[in-house]
């Protein structure tokens, strides 16, 4: 993961250090050039082409340092704009493209869309090792519905906090499998710009922002 803040700071520090070094070297070069011109043999003047080449090189380096400084400023401005734009999501309920959620004090909530023609459906909860620890039958009524799991297993014991996956198995009248779209529903508690992609912290864990499907009304 890329730490954006450290990256920007690093670019700015490198550009500042390089600029100071270039300035000192350029002053030294000009002093040497002036001294050499003052002490050159009038009958055999120094070839000016080498000085010209060095001046061109110094100019190129100076332009690159300026480019780095501008890039660091652009990254910082972009991050500030992103934070301002996403701040409106704080406290909002979102639906996230994920079947995996983090179990906390409030459990995990999923939303699913039961298609038409489903004759049987069952929901299962798997732990991180793929073990089914909870299952129950679902209503086959067509439409959008919620499934909330508080962490209790089929045997009645409580599970520890962690990540769990919901799986819905549904069949039609012929016994053929039917896909039931589902997603995690959670409240946004923070915005994270320190990763390689913009991420959000929620009551169901951390997710990349591009996984957000929609803002949702509170239950």
Image: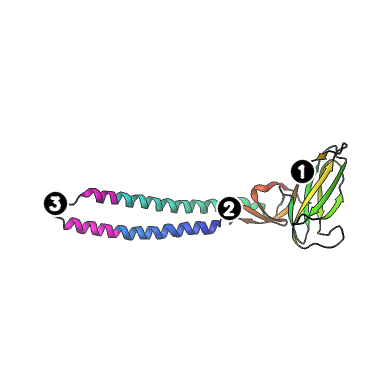
**SS majority, magenta:** helix
Horizontal relation, residue 74 to residue 165: left or right: left
Q: Which residue is disc 3 drawn over? A: 44
Total number of numbered discs in the rendering: 3
- Give the residue furthest to the left: 43
Residue 41 among magenta residues: yes
Horizontal relation, residue 166 to residue 120: left or right: left
Residue depicted at 87% across the width and 36% down the height: 174
Q: Quadrant of residue 35?
A: bottom left
The answer to which of marks 1 and 2 sits earlier in the sequence is 1
Q: Which residue is disc 1 drawn over? A: 181
State yes or no: discs 3 and 2 in contact (Cβ < 8 Å).
Answer: no
Q: Identify the magenta region.
A: 27-54
Where 161 sits versus 197, above or below? below
Residue count near mark 2 (Cα–Cα under 10 Å), binned few <14, some 14–19, many ≥20: few
Between the residue at mark 3 and the residue at mark 2, the CA separation in whole angstroms equals 60 Å
Q: Which residue is disc 2 drawn over? A: 196
Residue 150 among magenta residues: no
Residue count near mark 1 (Cα–Cα under 10 Å), binned few <14, some 14–19, many ≥20: some
């Amino acid at each position: 993961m890329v730490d954006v803040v450290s990256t920007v700071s690093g670019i700015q520090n490198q550009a500042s250090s390089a600029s100071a070094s270039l300035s000192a070297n350029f002053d030294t070069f000009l002093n040497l050039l002036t001294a050499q011109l003052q002490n050159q043999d009038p009958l055999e003047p120094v070839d000016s082409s080498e000085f010209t080449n060095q001046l061109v090189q110094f100019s190129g380096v100076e332009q690159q340092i300026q480019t780095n400084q501008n890039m660091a400023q652009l990254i910082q401005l972009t991050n500030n704009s992103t934070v301002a734009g996403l701040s409106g999501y704080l406290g909002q309920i979102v639906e996230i493209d994920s079947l995996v959620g983090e179990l906390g004090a409030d459990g995990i909530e999923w939303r699913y869309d039961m298609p038409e023609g489903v004759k049987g459906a069952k929901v299962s909860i798997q732990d991180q090792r793929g073990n089914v620890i909870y299952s129950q039958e679902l209503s086959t009524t067509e439409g959008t519905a919620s499934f909330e799991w508080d962490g209790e297993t089929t045997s009645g014991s409580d599970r520890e906090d962690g990540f769990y996956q919901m799986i819905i198995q549904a069949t039609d009248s012929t016994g053929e499998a039917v896909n039931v779209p589902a997603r995690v529903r959670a409240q946004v508690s923070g915005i994270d710009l320190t990763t390689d992609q913009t991420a959000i912290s929620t009551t169901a864990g951390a997710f990349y922002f591009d996984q957000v499907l929609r803002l949702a009304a509170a239950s």
